[in-house]
Amino acid sequence: MHAYRTHKCGDLRKSDIGQTVKLSGWIHRMRDHGGVLFIDLRDTTGLTQCVIDQDSPLLKTVESWRVESVITVTGRVKARHEGTENTKMGTGDIEVYIDEAVVQGAADVVPLQVADGDQAGEEVRLKYRFLDLRREGMHSRIRLRNNIIKSMRMKMWDQGFQEFNTPILTASSPEGARDYLVPSRLHPGKFYALPQAPQQFKQLLMVSGFDRYFQIAPCFRDEDGRADRLAEFYQLDMEMSFVAQEDIFATMTPVIDGIFNEFSGWTGTPHTVEWLPNMKYADALMNYGSDKPDMRNPLIVCDVTSVFNRDDVEFKAFKGVIAKGGVVRAIRCPKVGDQPRSFFDKLNSWAQQEGAPGLGYILIEGGEGKGPIAKFVPPAALAEMKAIAKLEDGDAIFFVCDMEAKAAKFAGRARDKICDDLPAGHSHVREKGVYKFFWLVDFPMFEADEKTGKIDFSHNPFSMPQGGLDALNGPDPLKVMATQYDCVCNGYELCSGGIRNHKPDVMIKAFEIAGYPYEVLEKKFGGMLSAFKYGAPPHGGCAFGIDRIVMILANEPNLREVYAFVMNGAYEDPMMQAPSDPTPQQLKDLHLKVVEPAKTQAA
């Protein structure tokens, strides 16, 4: 017989009754029923109920063992007594009567409960992450992550992609976030950077003629923590040669569609997968106030600036903003005329808590406007508003007035808040049981800083401008569109990508517009620029965030729930005590000196 086990704890069934077996695992629970000791023994496959009779010589020894100790038991498989079967367990028809038991690893008193979902705080969970990972929920989510990655690999291999591993120590590059820097011992005063993405390397692989690349790629970005973003994350990164935008969509849509269909029932509630038509970036901001709108929310934003800019409308609060170049965005909410005043007051209070003056509204009753703003909108102006927003009796329309970018953003947040506050059963509550995807296209190539007016790349600097060099030589760089795209699902950006700029003259001009002279381009991207001078194919790709995909499929709002080992919100690891202080010798080897930040003087 094997030293540790003949079966795993989730294996035994009725067909095994009568066998002598050996199991190893963790003591999940212990229950004393009148001198008969029951042990739920756990390993990664499940649980087996084990029994020690009251006349067993092992009883006194075993009852002193603690939960989470690792033990090995040998015993006989018997059928459970009639009426005591557990249909929720795969092994629920049997139990193992223990003849021998050995402790392999004794456990101290545990700082958090594994068998029961106690409310241990994040710091405790992360400090003892190895215990936290033993919990059924965490254990199953890590398995889900593993299975999703396995499925991704198979789907990419089936389409002829080759898997690569690109360098972790590389050069710093301006890709939209701060780099993590690594000092070089051999080159004093110089630093490597951890990659924000394997962008340049995967493009160089296309120049090298490999045609189809993919990688489960680790990426590092020194950004502030939040629930759906971590300092270190993984993405399904891919690149293809001789492709246009639609080829990328045709290749990756079936991969992601397959993943979500395959794992949609993991939480016990299967979802349908729906792909909506491609959406332009400008339309997303106008109609939904977001570049990653949740399309399960049926509410739509519209522009009613023209209504409040009429001569017969005397609402000075909006007119003053419009005179400075601002806009008025509105959200129509159908059939809320029967809602109590508190529904509207709560939305107004929410807006004030978010830093806005409020959330004004007009309610349509009997063809007329009611509410705090209605008196400023005469019948002719109301008729124009009703035509723009398609208002009907019983509808309400909510208003946001600000400069265009801020108005769009706040209208998007208000759109979601209004939808979430609608009562159950309303026709416009957020749809459930569906993953709604779409590709977001036609991003602006450049953007201007609101304060300085400086032109910079709005997203990925490596995207091909629509219209090529002719577009870049045009009079207004802010009107140049990039061949860039995102994939959005249920309010999350799952993917970003683009058709790449593979022509040196176009790349030089694009970076020049963004304020990077040729010398900087040569220094930062000399390898790729040089490669493009020796024959580069048209190519493009994208990267899907694996962690967000797992988070959505697991129905978890926090990425830390789908990772094995993570840091807290302050990017500290209580278990490994990272970051840590370097030793004087380490600093000496790296030619570094630590300069403590200046302490702020008390007022």
Image: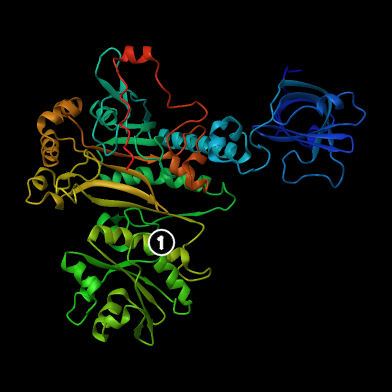
Q: Amino acid at mark 1?
A: Asp
Of the 4 image quadrants, the one containing the N terminus is: top right
Q: In the rendered image of this protein, does residue 17 appear above or below residue 473?
A: above
Seen as rendered, the residue at the extreme front is 603
Residue 332 falls left or right of residue 342: left
The quarter of the displayed image where residue 392 is located: bottom left
Q: In the rendered image of this protein, does residue 280 appear above or below residue 374?
A: above
Which percent across, then down, holds residue 320?
Answer: 19, 70
Q: In terms of depth relative to the viewer, which is nearer, 533 or 376?
A: 376
Which percent across, then down, holds residue 549?
Answer: 45, 44
Which percent across, then down, holds residue 343?
Answer: 46, 72
Q: Residue at x 27, y 86 (%)?
A: 379
Which percent across, then down, holds residue 165?
Answer: 37, 25
Q: In terms of depth relative to the viewer, which is nearer, 510 or 564?
A: 564
- Judged from the image, the secondary structure of the residue bearing numbered disc 1 is helix
Q: In the rendered image of this protein, does residue 327 appear above or below residue 559?
A: below
Q: Residue at x 26, y 84 (%)?
A: 378
Q: How many other residues sit within 10 Å of disc 1, few (<14), some (14-19) or many (≥20)?
A: many
Which residue is identified by label 1?
Answer: 416
Of the 4 image quadrants, the one containing the C terminus is: top left
Q: Residue at x 10, y 43 (%)?
A: 469
